[in-house]
Amino acid sequence: MKDLKYLAAFSIPLVAYIGIWQQGIWSFLTPVYVFGLIPIMETLLPVDTENLDDEERESKKKSKIFDWLLYLNVPIVFGLIAFTLIQVTTNRLELYEIVGLVFSLGIVLGSNGINVAHELGHRSLKHQQLLAKLLLMPSHYMHFYIEHNFGHHLLAATEEDPATAKYNQNLYSFWITSVFRQYVSAWGIQKKLLNNNNNSFFSIKNDMFWYLLFQAAYLISLFFIFGLAGLLVGAAAGIVGFLLLETINYIEHYGLRRAKKASGRYERVREIHSWNSNHVVGRVVLYELTRHSDHHYKSSKKYQILDHYDQSPQMPFGYPTSMVLSTVPPLWFYIMNKRVPEEMKVLAV
């Protein structure tokens, strides 16, 4: 039964469904749940630093139930998109209700869309990679597949990484730099991949072209099926989704830096280069994303077997709570700056 704890991740789209169905003030039920109720639960419940033993790890590694818990997010995410846009286009809604629906759907696109895509995107099987790209599409972020796997995991906790927040950089500045630099980086990585395989930039092997095509087709489909209102709501929810991703990027490596060796190369990524959180609610609703230190240390490990390391920098709160704190820069700096290792503050200057 413990394996089914990750069903809690579906509480977010369930709450979103209720809010979108009920409308009115209920339209804001999802942001209240994710950024209000979950932080309260994380504060009240104890952290869990326990790791699996070798026998449990092997058993969970082979179990298919953990994969199917990820796959189920595909029909849920796209079903909720359709349900939301039907509600928007068949009901007379006030502006505040539409705003609430946009945030509700956007949160699902970020948590059950991009976050699950991140996990599946690290898998080696083609159908899992395809599902990852499909889940990235509604948030206009298919390029994340390339930049994250071939860029971020090589450069994390360095100045060269667009998705690593600098010491004393606020969230809103990071949104701008990360969004644009990651997109440019994805094109650069794609060009290198094509060159390495002797393919032209205009080859059909250029995935970035396909991403543009598929994302455009998705938005055009929204327009033809649901009209201008459906297009605007769908596009806006996608923006909310990728800004949630960038907020998570912000807190995952804030202020942490890898040292350079005498050769000029960076030290390898270690457990100390990502912020870790063992708060139980955030762990299960985000499929163990909060054990980010081990994910970067061994990126091929599946979410259900990620470990805690005592030497990893620990967040005082869970990821959902930390995301809320990051939106208030003075409070974030007050809490987190003293937790950044002194030697890394020097590296970040």
Image (spheres, rainbow, N blue to C red):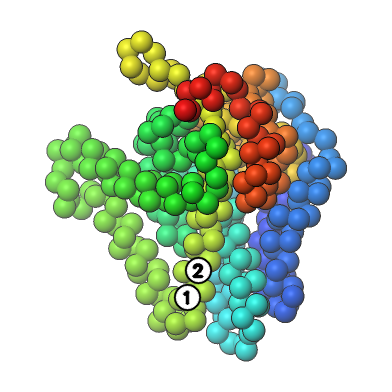
Cα gap from disc 1 to disc 2, whole angstroms: 6 Å
Q: Residue at x 37, y 74 (%)?
A: 220
In the rendered view, tell whether residue 211 sits above or below residue 62.
below
Q: Residue at x 65, y 44 (%)?
A: 330
Q: Amino acid at mark 2?
A: Ala
Badge 2 density bin: few <14, some 14–19, many ≥20, Cα 10 Å = some
Quarter of the figure that contains the N terminus: top right
The answer to whether residue 266 is seen in the rendering is yes
Image spot of residue 3 (x, y percent): 72, 40
For residue 333, which quarter of the picture?
top right
Q: Which residue is mark 1?
A: 232
In the rendered view, tell whether residue 345 sits above or below residue 198.
above
Image spot of residue 298 (x, y percent): 51, 26
Image spot of residue 221 (x, y percent): 40, 75
- Cβ–Cβ under 8 Å for marks 1 and 2: yes
User: Along the horizontal axis of the image, is 216 left or right of 310?
Assistant: left
Badge 1 density bin: few <14, some 14–19, many ≥20, Cα 10 Å = some
User: Along the horizontal axis of the image, is 184 left or right of 195?
Assistant: right
Residue sitting at the far top: 262
Local SS, label 1:
helix
In the rendered view, tell whether residue 30 sits above or below residue 191.
below
Q: Which residue is at the front of the view, 56 or 300?
A: 300
Q: Amino acid at mark 1?
A: Leu
Q: Which residue is at the front of the view, 130 or 18?
A: 18
Q: Residue at x 74, y 75 (%)?
A: 25
User: Along the horizontal axis of the image, is 223 left or right of 273?
Assistant: left
Q: Which residue is at the front of the view, 208 or 242?
A: 242
Local SS, label 2:
helix
Q: Which residue is mark 2?
A: 236
